Image (cartoon, helix red, strand yellow):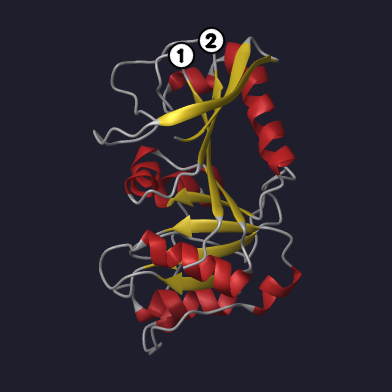
Amino acid sequence: MNRPYIICHMVSSVDGKVTGDFLKAEKSKKGIEEYYRIHRDFKADAFACGRVTMEESFTGGFTPDLTPYADAKIERTDFIAEAEANAKRYAVSFDRYGKLGWKAPYIEDVDPGYGGSHIIQVMCECVSDAYLAYLRDIGVSYIFAGENEMDIQLAMHKLNALFGVESILLEGGSTINAAFYEANLVDEISLVVLAVSAHAGDKTLFNTDNVKRFKMRSSRVIKGNAAWVRYERG
C-alpha cells in the first residue's frame, strides 16, 4: 500500500528526553524557535500528534457538549469534510476513542507552519456516534483505522489515498512515536538537540525497548547553542 514519507521531527535534551521543564527554560527558547523554523522549511503535507499532545498544544482541554447529538446514528465510514477542499496542509490527530474538543475544522495557531491546517481525526470504530456527529457538524474530517486498536499502517494508506498526503512530520509524544517506530513507519528522524539535560522521569523519543538501526544523514550547529541532527533508516 502506498503511504506518506514520515519524518519524526522533535526537540530533545542532550540525554534524549522529549518532555520536561527544560522545554520551558529561557535558555531553550532560541533552539525551540529553530525547531519551528525547520518544521516550516520541511514544507510537509501534514503534521501528526497523539491525543495528549494535541490537547496540550491546541484544544486546551475543551470538552464539547455532545448532548444535542445524543440520538445520532452514524455509519463507520470515513468522512471528508467540505473544509478540506481549501486545505494547504493537514493536522493529523490520533485520538483512538474520540476525546479531543475541537472547535473548528482548522488548527488555530500563530505559527504559519501549524495555523490553518485542516484537522483529520484518526480513530477506532468504537468511538461514539455523538462524537462523530459533532465532528461532522463543525467540519472536521475523520478516518477509521481499526475496530478497537489503532492500525497505523491502514491510517497512513488512507491519508495518502483520500487526502493525497505524501509527507508527514511526526511530532507526538513518546507513545505515538513508538507506535510508528514499531510499525516500521519512521523513515527519518530529525532532532533539534538542546544543550540541557532533563529529569530522570521525563519521557524519551520512543517509548519502546525495540532496537533499530539508523544511519547519520547530517548534523550541524544551529542558533540557540543547539544541534540539528538527521538520521535515516539504516
Residue position for label 1? 14
Tell me where residue 46 appears, x and y as whole percent: 61, 54
Callout count? 2
Q: Residue at x 63, y 55 (%)?
A: 107
Q: Position of residue 157 (x, y in %)?
A: 48, 67
**59 or 154: nearer the viewer:** 154
Task: In the rendered view, tell whether residue 10 sits above or below residue 132.
Answer: above
Residue drawn at x 44%, y 35% as measured from the top left: 234
Label pair 2/1, CB-CB below 8 angstroms:
yes
| Structural distance between the alpha carbons of marks 2 and 1 | 6 Å
Identify the residue position indicated by label 2 in the image: 195
Give the percent coordinates (x, y) of residue 148.
25, 68
Q: Residue at x 58, y 56 (%)?
A: 91
Disc marking residue 82:
none
53 sits left or right of 109 in the view = left
**Rendered view: 39 above or below 91:** above
Q: Residues within 10 Å of mark 1 (few under 14, many from 20)?
A: some
Point out the tag, 2 or 1, that comes first from the N-terminus: 1
Find numbered disc 2 in the image and state the secondary structure of the residue it sits on.
loop
Quarter residue 63 falls in:
bottom left
Amino acid at dot 2: Ala
Question: Helix or strand or loop: what does disc 1 sit on?
Answer: loop
Give the percent coordinates (x, y) of residue 206. 35, 35
**As displayed, is residue 86 above or below residue 39?**
below
